[in-house]
Image (spheres, helix red, strand yellow):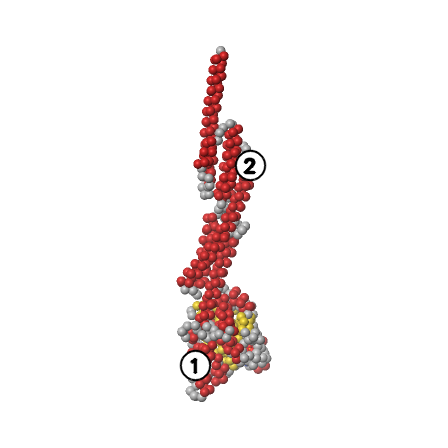
């Protein structure tokens, strides 16, 4: 008894499939639809939304199932999802699946890789032209990293002929360099359904290889088929073959096999199906072109590129498509990183948060710019060269710089209004009691400056606004002082002299120091003047006294 049968017996199916666990839910969605009238292929918007929503840091591995119509492809696709129904299964002779469909939930293969499953319209149906078949087949091969060719029964000369599309593949697809096309083809699994033949001790893979040997009969017919055989061997380097018996014994149940519970399917079929599912899990590789792995969004871009080429009757060129995919991805990564940066800057320095101190402003700018630059470079590392990453980083930094220049201006303006508002409200209190005695007036100014410094630190224009206000206010201060002094009959020459020698425009953060020095100097000068006035007064008094004394003396 082989490992799979034992696992089945022990009912450890889930463990066996643990590396291919589909997320709960999900449904089939059209990936590429075919316009009935024009015959044009179109990537469906539902698939666009789904593929764009996949995590950028996850690679996709793509399994595509193709083959003649009404051969149980959709039923097999559902089995790969470990379910009986999902992709639509038709019970009549009419072709069921139209266009190319995909499952809208990625299946986790590992931490970094998700499987995307693609089910295709059957080939050689009576409703479609060969041209449509060629396009469906070409797209399936080009998009897949593992291509399953599904057919009924053993491999016959007819089934080789059915695959004549492969012989044309190298003329239908271009690489875009001198490289051999075979490096760009997916792994190839040939699945034979309702297979009950004796393989005479050979494995299905050996059987396939035997069938792909050239037929030595030299008729024109066999030459044609040998060409197909050669093309299959040439294009698909990695080949596997699987033989699946009938899922149920009773013919009547075959038409609705999706309604038969898994437990009731023939044990032989279950064993074979599990072996296939398990081998897909083991052999599946992330979709890559020229060593560049694709994520969901890049896969979408690839589908768009190939579809467009086929619609315009051009041969899809793999490396040209890859270049465009990389270009589009670079733009998206750059945009996403920039939007992330912009949104976080907005959270930290939104309109309602401004103004912020310049030190804080630069700290936030540095932190977020480093964070998003790193994210941006990490995401591009797998698709761009070092030199190109540097070039893109330069552009990214330039974009950030432009944004921060605008933000800086906003902060500037917010700082101005904030400081102005604060100063106005503080000045209101100052004016209320004016004019107080001069020493009180000066001490009020000092306490205003202290409050202003404490409450307005987040404004980058704190000192400029104050300087501006003071330069307008200087006159008031001086007037108050002059009034005060004039009340006492003193002159203000010394104060004016000081003003003439002091800096007229103060725009630096040392303004408070300068202002304090200014205020202190004013105080000093006033004290000096007061002393001088006192002396003059004393002298005048002495003179008056002397005069009075002289007068009295003269009178006597
Ligand atoms: N004999 C047989 N019938 C099957 C098998 N699997 C599914 N069927 C039946 O075959 C019919 C077609 O199944 P689908 O899975 O829709 O086949 P398909 O290849 O996707 O068909 P198209 O989308 O029309 O090309 C249905 O009636 C199924 O119940 C099988 O392994 N053997
Ligand atoms: Mg189908």
Residue 173 can be seen, yes or no: yes
- Residue 297 numbered tag: none
Viewer-closest of 223 and 478: 478
Q: How much space separates mark 1 and mark 2, taking CA atoms?
A: 99 Å
* Horizontal arrangement in the rendering, residue 424 relative to residue 380 (left or right): right
Q: Quadrant of residue 500?
A: top left
Viewer-closest of 157 and 85: 157
Q: SS at mark 2? A: helix
Classed neighbour count for the residue bearing mark 1: other residues with Cα under 10 Å, few (<14), some (14–19), many (≥20): some
Residue displayed at 48% across by 52% down: 405
User: Residue 283, image x and y in percent?
Assistant: 45, 73
Contact between labelled residues 2 and 1, with CB atoms less than 8 Å apart = no
Residue displayed at 47% across by 56% down: 400
User: Residue 489, image x and y in percent?
Assistant: 51, 27
Residue displayed at 55% across by 70% down: 44
- Residue 230 numbered tag: 1
User: Residue 310, image x and y in percent?
Assistant: 50, 74
Residue 76 can be seen, yes or no: no
* Vertical side of 153 occupied by 500: above or below: above
* Vertical side of 177 occupied by 342: above or below: above
Q: Circle 2 sits on which residue?
A: 431
* Vertical side of 118 occupied by 162: above or below: below
User: Residue 16, image x and y in percent?
Assistant: 48, 71
Pointer 1 or 2: first along the chain: 1
């Amino acid at each position: 008894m082989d490992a799979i049968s034992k696992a089945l017996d022990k009912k450890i199916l889930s463990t066996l499939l643990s590396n291919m666990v589909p997320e709960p839910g999900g449904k089939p969605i059209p990936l590429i639809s075919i316009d009935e009238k024009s015959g044009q292929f179109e990537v469906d918007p539902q698939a666009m939304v789904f593929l764009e929503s996949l995590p950028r840091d996850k690679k996709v591995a793509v399994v595509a199932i193709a083959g003649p119509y009404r051969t149980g492809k959709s039923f097999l696709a559902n089995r790969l999802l470990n379910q009986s129904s999902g992709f639509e299964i038709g019970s009549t002779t009419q072709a069921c699946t139209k266009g190319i469909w995909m499952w809208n939930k990625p299946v986790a293969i590992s931490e970094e890789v998700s499987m995307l499953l693609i089910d295709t319209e059957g080939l050689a149906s009576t409703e479609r032209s060969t041209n449509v078949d060629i396009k469906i087949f070409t797209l399936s091969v080009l998009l897949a990293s593992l291509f399953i060719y599904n057919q009924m029964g053993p491999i016959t000369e007819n089934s080789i002929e059915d695959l004549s599309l492969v012989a044309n593949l190298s003329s239908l697809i271009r690489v875009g360099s001198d490289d051999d096309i075979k490096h760009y083809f997916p792994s190839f699994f040939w699945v034979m359904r309702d297979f009950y033949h004796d393989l005479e001790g050979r494995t299905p893979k050996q059987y396939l290889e035997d069938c792909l040997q050239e037929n030595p009969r030299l008729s024109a017919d066999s030459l044609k088929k040998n060409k197909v055989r050669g093309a299959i061997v040439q294009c698909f380097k990695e080949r596997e073959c699987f033989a699946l018996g009938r899922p149920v014994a009773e013919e009547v149940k075959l038409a609705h096999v999706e309604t038969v519970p898994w437990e009731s399917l023939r044990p032989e079929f279950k064993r074979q199906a599990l072996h296939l599912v398990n081998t897909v899990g083991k052999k599946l590789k992330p979709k890559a072109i020229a060593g560049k792995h694709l994520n969901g969004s890049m896969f979408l871009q690839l589908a768009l590129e190939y579809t467009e080429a086929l619609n315009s009757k051009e041969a899809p060129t793999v490396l040209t498509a890859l270049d465009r995919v990389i270009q589009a991805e670079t733009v998206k990564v750059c945009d996403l990183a920039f939007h992330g940066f912009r949104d976080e800057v907005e959270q930290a320095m939104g309109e309602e948060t401004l103004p912020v101190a310049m030190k804080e402003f630069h700290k936030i700018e540095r932190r977020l710019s480093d964070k998003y630059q790193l994210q941006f470079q990490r995401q591009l590392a797998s698709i761009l060269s070092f030199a190109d990453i540097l070039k893109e980083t330069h552009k990214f930094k330039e974009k950030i710089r432009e944004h921060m220049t605008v933000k800086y201006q906003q902060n500037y303006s917010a700082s101005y209004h904030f400081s102005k508002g604060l100063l106005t409200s503080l000045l209101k209190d100052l004016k209320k009691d004016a004019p107080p005695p001069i020493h009180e007036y000066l001490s009020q100014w000092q306490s205003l400056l202290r409050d202003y410094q404490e409450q307005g630190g987040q404004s980058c224009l704190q000192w400029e606004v104050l300087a501006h206000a003071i330069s307008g206010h200087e006159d008031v201060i001086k007037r108050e002082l002059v009034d005060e002094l004039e009340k006492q009959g003193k002159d203000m020459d010394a104060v004016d002299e000081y003003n003439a020698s002091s800096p007229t425009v103060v725009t630096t953060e040392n303004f408070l120091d300068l202002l304090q020095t200014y205020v202190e100097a004013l105080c000093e000068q006033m004290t000096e003047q007061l002393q001088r006035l006192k002396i003059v007064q004393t002298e005048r008094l002495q003179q008056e006294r002397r005069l009075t004394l002289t007068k009295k003396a003269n009178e006597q």
